[in-house]
Amino acid sequence: MKKLLILLTLLLGSAAALAGDWPYDEKADAQAELRQTLAAAQQSHLPVLLILGANWCEDCRALDAALKSGKSAELIARAFKVVKVDVGNFDHNLDIDAAYGHPIAKGIPAAVVLSPDNKVLYATRAGELADARRMSETGIYEFFERVSRQAAQ
């Protein structure tokens, strides 16, 4: 029994290592990263796309993958400076969530678009991205295309 438990532990550890990079840095200084991204946004005159999520969240991982490929990747690179903030089990970096009106209240991932001077231009309030794994690539693109147009006004 003990050997089986050790084997299972090793297999799970190996699977986690093979899973690749997680989208959210659980040990990051989220406040510092947000400040750095806002500073870069001021230089580039682009809005900041703040994504709040967690590595355990399948929808968060699905959104992250979608934003790294195809039309969505091109749109995000052209229209935003991006910062991702880990919220753990809804117990991590909640000060950032609170500062922007609790966008995670209806689920994660959640998104906030900030002007370079840190004003909220858009925030998910109704869990718009909380079902990201079931949104098509086109659906995700169209969502962020709408948000980028709104932020540009």
Image (tube, helix red, strand yellow):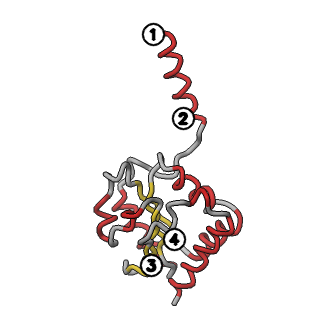
- 132 displayed left or right of 92: right
- Which residue matches tag 2? 16
Q: Earlier in the sequence, mark 4 or mark 2?
A: 2
Point 47% across, 16% down: residue: 5
x, y percent for residue 87:
38, 54
Q: Are marks 3 and 1 in contact (CB under 8 Å)?
A: no
Q: Are marks 3 and 4 in contact (CB under 8 Å)?
A: no
Point 44% across, 70% down: residue: 126
Total numbered labels placed on residues in the image: 4
Of circles 3 and 4, the one toward us is 3
Amino acid type assigned to the residue bearing label 4 in the image: Lys
- Which residue matches tag 1? 2
Q: Earlier in the sequence, mark 3 or mark 4?
A: 4
Determine the secondary structure under disc 3: strand
The answer to which quarter of the image holds residue 119 is: bottom left
32 or 3, which lies in front? 3
x, y percent for residue 102:
34, 67
Crowding near the residue tagged with mark 4, few <14, some 14–19, many ≥20 C-alpha atoms within 10 Å: many
Determine the secondary structure under disc 2: helix
Amino acid type assigned to the residue bearing label 3 in the image: Tyr
- Say which mark, if any, is on residue 35: none
Crowding near the residue tagged with mark 1, few <14, some 14–19, many ≥20 C-alpha atoms within 10 Å: few
- Which residue matches tag 3? 122
- Which residue matches tag 4? 81
